[in-house]
Image (cartoon, helix red, strand yellow):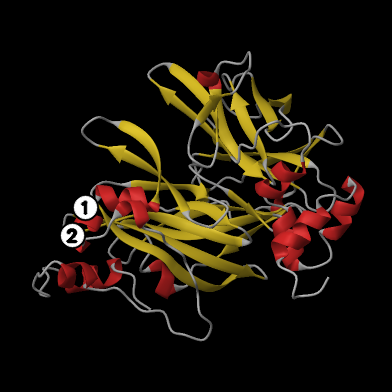
Amino acid sequence: MSDEIPIEVQMDIVRRLPVKCILQCRSVSKSWKSAIDTIYFTIKSCVRQAKNFPYVLQYRKGFNGYMHYVCQNFAFTPVPTNLSFSELNPIGCSQGVWAFSYGRILPHYKVIVWNPSIRRSVGTLIPYLTIEPAYEKRLLAFGIQPDNLDPTILYIAYPFNPEYPWCVLLFSFNTKQRKQLDDEFLPRQSIRLKKSSQAVVNGHIFWCAYERLFANDGSEYKSYMMVSFNLVTQGFHVLGIPAQLLAQLPLPFYVSNLRDNVVVSGNLIVEDHCFFCVWTLEVVGGSIQTFQCLISIPTPYPLKLIGFDNTNNPILEVQNPDEYVMNLAGLPVVLEQAKVFKKKGIDPSTYAITFKNEKNVPAQGCIFLYRLSHGKSLDVDNPVQTALAYPVQ
């Protein structure tokens, strides 16, 4: 199509094609693949769904579990099912399809793969592999193979003692077969993954990871990195984080995605002040090529990035420390709770935000931004720690 036709109009045409033709369109260009692989394209293409629910919220309150469809204005619609939501634990999401573990892990894992756009799910049992009863730590991962659209479950186990190797089991929903990966496809056995978050981008599953190392004085510390798994070649790869970026990241960090970019986020505590930061990473050829700070804002309490809406605005999980209630909010809500609007004399009802990244323009650092905006002295107790904590490029 002509470049003069907006991508939204192009996708409106593509989504009217038969399914096999749409799959072929994913190979036309990177921009088409990125647009077709989104949940928004899936929702608009689905004729079985009466209402559009771009998000799904699953949470616990006390001993009870809940799951809701969430529309653009954050209105909730309960998800009908016979399953106990308190037994569901999210594994990950790939191409709009979710995977959950269900119930106890012994003697087997029960895994449920659910497509919310067509409201269908399928489950399987993953055998509990172990050498000794207290042998291993375990985690599950999920992704859809981009070449054949095969939903794949990754069962990862490694011993408490880092001197012994990993055990990784791969389960294919298309073939209904399981296989164990050979050692040549596994990362260093001393590496450990943070199972709190994962993201699937361009056929790779990404995690925050670390190794325990020892300094010259004998003290132990964690060296952080990222680990990816290629769903096509079925091998792991270790991604080193550039020193300039690592010095500014909250550790450990959460991993998510924004379209075809990997996103890392977290909260930095600097001199009793909390800052929430979001970074976008461009991963090319197994390495982090570029990175950019998307958000860096002060917040009265920790935040967690849930995802992005269809205009790339962040959706945040906000915890009120007085009531211990978890809420979903967009960035304007966070700014209002942090009293930024009041201090700046901005009307929240008319506030809008748009992120635009110019080319060939150096990123502006925000060191001392908080102190300058609040009339505080630039003298700090620990200059080295402050320089490492504030995002500067």
Q: Which residue is mark 2?
A: 343
Could you tell whether 67 is left or right of 285 in the image?
A: left
> Along the line of sight, which residue is nearer the eye, 136 or 352?
352
* Residue occupying the point 36% across, 56% down: 350
Provide the secondary structure element on which disc 2 rests. helix
> Along the line of sight, which residue is nearer the eye, 221 or 15?
15
> Along the line of sight, which residue is nearer the eye, 251 or 13?
13
Provide the secondary structure element on which disc 1 rests. loop
Residue 181 image-quadrant placement = top right
* Residue occupying the point 68% across, 27% down: 112
Could you tell whether 179 is left or right of 287 in the image?
A: right
Q: In x, y percent, where is residue 290?
A: 54, 74
Tell me if I can see residue 345 in this picture. yes
Q: In x, y percent, where is residue 75?
A: 49, 33
Q: Which residue is mark 1?
A: 339
Q: Compared with residue 212, is residue 285 higher up or lower down, i.e. above or below?
A: below
> Along the line of sight, which residue is nearer the eye, 211 or 61?
61
Answer whether labels 2 and 1 touch (C-beta < 8 Å). yes
Three-letter code, disc 2: Lys
Mark linked to residue 167: none
Q: Compared with residue 119, is residue 336 higher up or lower down, i.e. above or below?
A: below
Q: Compared with residue 220, is residue 327 higher up or lower down, i.e. above or below?
A: above
